[in-house]
Image: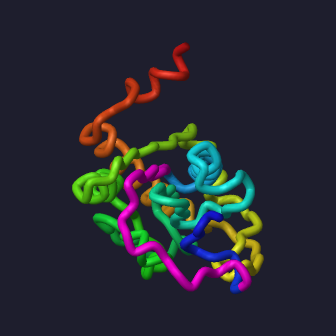
Amino acid sequence: DSLDYAPQSPSTSHDCWPTTPPRRVFAIFGSESSGTKLVARLIAHAAGVAQYGTWRATAAARRGDTEVHHFSLPWGATCAKSVPPIEREWNSSARWPTRSRFFLGATSHVQAYASSGADAIAVLVVREPLVATQSKLSVRDFIGKNGSHHFGQHCANATMAATEDEISHSILRAALRALPSACSHGEGVASR
């Protein structure tokens, strides 16, 4: 059974969380509305962490010694009048991030897990920027961490959405430059 660090409802919560660090971490990052949630769910399924459709792709899920982390950039609540802070790392044992909205440094997050001995793999998701921004500004059905539904949008302010997207793209570019690569940055599968 998969341990979801952000339970969908009290009926699915777990009283006992792993205290040992994971041996393998798949950390999925991408700009908000770029498809990170879909990719995180697919990887969680392929890695045996959660059957597809059973995990909402909240912050993290774990089975055994494997974790899948999902972080849209920025992660969390809807945008506000100020730019969210950039955090260096997030410890999955916290179950749920304490900030309501923040950017997570992909490079520092993955390096922190790798330095603790985990096989830490960053998966960077990109989507055509105009389409991603339009999606970020569109109204949709959101499911809160307690399972409640509400309609809203990631961001109602086009200027703030553009600013957040610039920051997320900078974080992704820095990760592409700093982290080891398993393929040639988008030239692997797509060019076959």
Where is residue 175? Give x, y as percent.
32, 44
Q: Nearer the viewer, residue 141 or 135?
A: 141
Q: Quadrant of the C terminus?
A: top right
Q: Is residue 122 left or right of residue 153?
A: left
Q: Is residue 157 above or below residue 125?
A: below
x 38%, y 24%: residue? 184
| Residue 5 visible in rendering | yes
Task: State the image quarter where residue 7 is shown.
Answer: bottom right
Q: Quadrant of the N terminus?
A: bottom right
- Magenta residues, start to end: 11-30
Q: Nearer the viewer, residue 90 or 172?
A: 90
Colour mode? Answer: rainbow
Where is residue 93? Give x, y as percent.
42, 74
Task: State the image quarter where residue 20 is shown.
Answer: bottom left
Q: Is residue 163 left or right of residue 15?
A: left
x 41%, y 51%: residue? 24
Answer whether residue 92 is magenta in the image.
no
| Residue 72 visible in rendering | no
x 22%, y 55%: residue? 115
Where is residue 61? Give x, y as percent.
55, 63
